[in-house]
Amino acid sequence: VTGGGRAGSAAGADDVHVLYLAGSGRSGSTVVTTLLGQLPGFFAAGELRYLWSRGVQEDHVCGCGQPFGRCPVWTAVMARTDPRGRADAAGIGRRLLQRLRVLRVPSMLARRALGRRAVPPHPDDHVIASLYRAVADETGARVVVDSSKLPPYGLLLQRLPGVRVHVLHVVRDPRATAFSWMRRKVSRDRDDEALMPRQQPVKSSLLWLLWNLLTAVAWRDRDARVSRFRYEDFVARPREVLAPVVRALGADPDDLPFLDDHSVRLAATHAVAGNPNRRDSGAVRLRPDLEWQQAMRSRDRSLVTALTWPGLLRFGYPLAARRPSAGRPTTPTSRSAS
Ligand SMILES: [Zn+2]
């Protein structure tokens, strides 16, 4: 095992290595992305599928605190990207949403079963591929960390020329994610009080189930370029859980900026789009965020459990939507996580 992932028939020595965080929303992938982005040679890029709309077009705030159009890193990256990316960012963003729609998932699976690309090729793909090349060239990164999460985008990405995808699937208890989706949260993406989008438990549960099972089907455990862990295990034992992921990418886990077993020191990143936690920096304590166990209505908890049970079983979560203290030992309850 080389660990660098360069082996394999279709791989080119010059490929851009992308660590793709796959799964569903509000799964804690933001802090994982920021943390991995601290490694030498890694660049935490954020949710790149939204770069065209929320970055180029709408000028949301970058992880560094500057609006996208004034961030020196993204300005330089965009100058290296295929110029069609700046000229038609709105179109690319809009077409990506259409191409990756949830209603297209059955046809994606059918195409994949026939050995074809799950997401049909499109002229935009050259522009998208040039973005990843530009990020790697401009930042000097050996690994670009993309927290876009949506499995269909990962399927699109891994068929782009010159891009070598490694997948990290982070799963979080769907009752915790449903609770997070219901909560009011300011996006901090612009200078207003705009809120993060919210979802009702039925929708968030069904999407949790779809995206996590699709991720598990699309990227199997036996593939050396696939890693998978539960967010709850990550916050309980972050060093232990991250070490094999980091080693598989040819990096040294000792380079992760741990202050102690549960705290890390994070430098600001240039992550675009996504959870406002991406702008957290300094000393950060990794916490399980178990507020849902106290504050979520038992009716909602039971509903989420009933809708997600195949995934609960697949990923080893208890079916009983129980009150706290029956779980694994963890650090004290607190807010945080994404
Ligand atoms: Zn920036």
Image: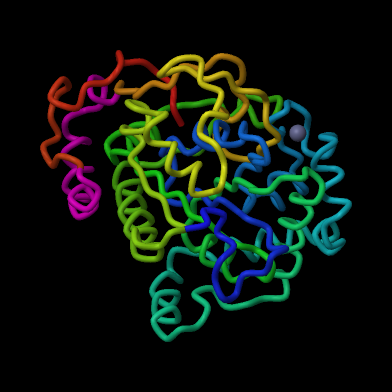
Residue at the bottom extreme of this rendering: 114
| Closer-to-camera residue (145/99) | 145
Does the magenta run of residues contain 310? yes
Residue at 25 percent across and 27 percent down: it is 296
Q: Quadrant of ligand 1?
A: top right
Does the magenta run of residues contain 163? no
Q: Position of residue 299 (x, y in %)?
A: 17, 34
When asked about the image quadrant of residue 63, the answer is: top right
Q: Position of residue 303 (x, y in %)?
A: 19, 42
| Closer-to-camera residue (94/129) | 129
Main SS, magenta residues? helix
How many numbered circles does the render carry? 0
When asked about the image quadrant of residue 112, the answer is: bottom left
Looking at the image, residue 293 lies above or below residue 120: above
Residue 183 left/right relative to 329: right
| Closer-to-camera residue (303/156) | 156
Residue at 62 percent across and 53 percent down: it is 49
| Closer-to-camera residue (317/180) | 317
Q: Position of residue 152 (x, y in %)?
A: 49, 63
> Which segment did they paint magenta?
292-316
When asked about the image quadrant of residue 328, the answer is: top left
Residue at the front extreme of this rendering: 1
Residue at 36 percent across and 36 percent down: it is 231
Q: Position of residue 317 (x, y in %)?
A: 20, 41
